[in-house]
Image (cartoon, rainbow, N blue to C red):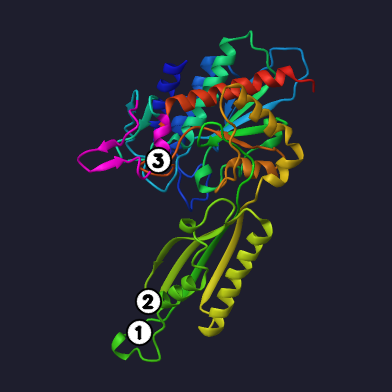
Amino acid sequence: MKEQILDRFLRYVKVDTQSEFGVEKIPSTDKQFILANQIVEELKAIGLSEVEIDEHCYIMATLPANTDKKIPTIGFVAHIDTSPDFTATGCAPIVWENYDGGDLVLNEKENLVLRTSEFPEMVQFKGQTMITTNGLTLLGADDKAGVTEIVSAMEYLINHPEIKHGKIRICFTPDEEVGRGADLFDVEKFGAEWAYTMDGSLPGEIEYENFNAAYAALSIQGKIVHPGSAKDKMVCSMHIATEFIQALPADEVPEKTDGYEGFFHLLSINGGVDKTDLSYIIRDHDKEKFEAKKVFMQETVDRLNEKHNHCIQLTLTDQYYNMAEKVRPVMHIVDLAREAITNLGMEPITRPIRGGTDGSRLSFMGLPCPNIFAGGLNFHSRYEYVALESIVSATETIVEIAKLMEGRDW
């Protein structure tokens, strides 16, 4: 199975499926259909039923139950798109067999090195098969590792009918990386009582807490006149933007926070004297602190508007919420995954996600959906990597969950 999994993953990452911010249609990029259509044919070939893809690039399929025992229908979900944060065009994966635990020179010409001093997690994969790129693109393990694991687990269960299991539904979504992966997810049609996203990092992870999230767009209107006659006339929107940035808490930024600590993250600045646009994301695990951050930003804008003749427009949009609110009442679904991970000789790791997944929104849409490790690290980066053994372990975790479901009295 290991070689089949490697071949499948390498085929997937070579297809550019990068999504794009600010596009109304779903999927945001037509190229996501290229891989999606390939996956559809692959699912049919391995013997899944009810395989379909809709006009918005959502793939659904069914592994029918092979037992008469009454077992709840569960699901597994992953996303096919890759992040717009760094290019995915021309991905050239490199396979490093029997990794020696040291630095990896991704691209000697460009002096791009994956260094253990910067990414110490690497050393735990010594002796395993590492997969990187040549440093010129991201890898796309986020979340093509997850897609690989789900397809491979379904194939394994089909090829091993002696393993009894209930009905399993799978779905591959577009546009997760731009926050829209769950927008058109048909929970009723999916028909599972709960599901798991395969979209985490280190082997053993099972996560059910994530950020509450909002997006903030600010538009600051200045006034440009000739600088030679600007006194008491010119209003430099960039100066006001700087004043706003400095008014936010200096320590509540991603590079200074960890664990359950939230932040304001400045994503982009685009402007000149006459007009400047800022975009932020606001994050916090605690709902009250999350709401307080939004209030603080609005109050800061109101104060600066009083000072600067109401030149700032702020639009705040909630993106997703902490899935813990919906998962805690059904913690047996987390315990099931923990048991599967333990049975495979791994230590279950539970910690808050400093981000979000499709599962966070799906949980609020009526489909409780914790997150299981997919194996990749350094997502959204030229330094992204994954160990083949991690992908195999995640595949085995899916199979083990199916086994455990059959062994329960429901």
Q: Amino acid at mark 3?
A: Pro
Q: Amino acid at mark 1?
A: Val
The residue most toward the left is: 109
Query: Within 10 angstroms of label 1, few (less than 14), some, or many (20 or more) residues?
Result: some
Position of 206 with respect to 109 (left or right) is right
Q: CA distance from mark 3 to mark 2?
A: 44 Å
Q: Earlier in the sequence, mark 1 or mark 2?
A: 1
* Residue pictured at 52% horizontal, 69% vertical: 248
Q: Amino acid at mark 2?
A: Val
Query: Within 10 angstroms of label 3, few (less than 14), some, or many (20 or more) residues?
Result: few
Can residue 17 be seen in the rendering of this structure? yes
Q: Percent x, y for residue 24?
A: 52, 50
Position of 400 with respect to 146 (left or right) is right
Q: What kind of element bears circle 1?
A: loop
Q: CA distance from mark 3 to mark 1?
A: 53 Å
Q: Earlier in the sequence, mark 3 or mark 1?
A: 3
Residue carrying label 1: 225
Which sits in the foreground, 219 or 351?
351
Q: Report the span colored magenta.
A: 99-125
Q: CA distance from mark 1 to mark 2?
A: 9 Å
Q: Is residue 278 magenta?
A: no
| Residue 273 image label | 2
Residue carrying label 3: 120
Q: What kind of element bears circle 3?
A: helix
Q: Earlier in the sequence, mark 3 or mark 2?
A: 3
- Quadrant in which residue 303 is drawn: bottom right
Which sits in the foreground, 268 or 32?
268
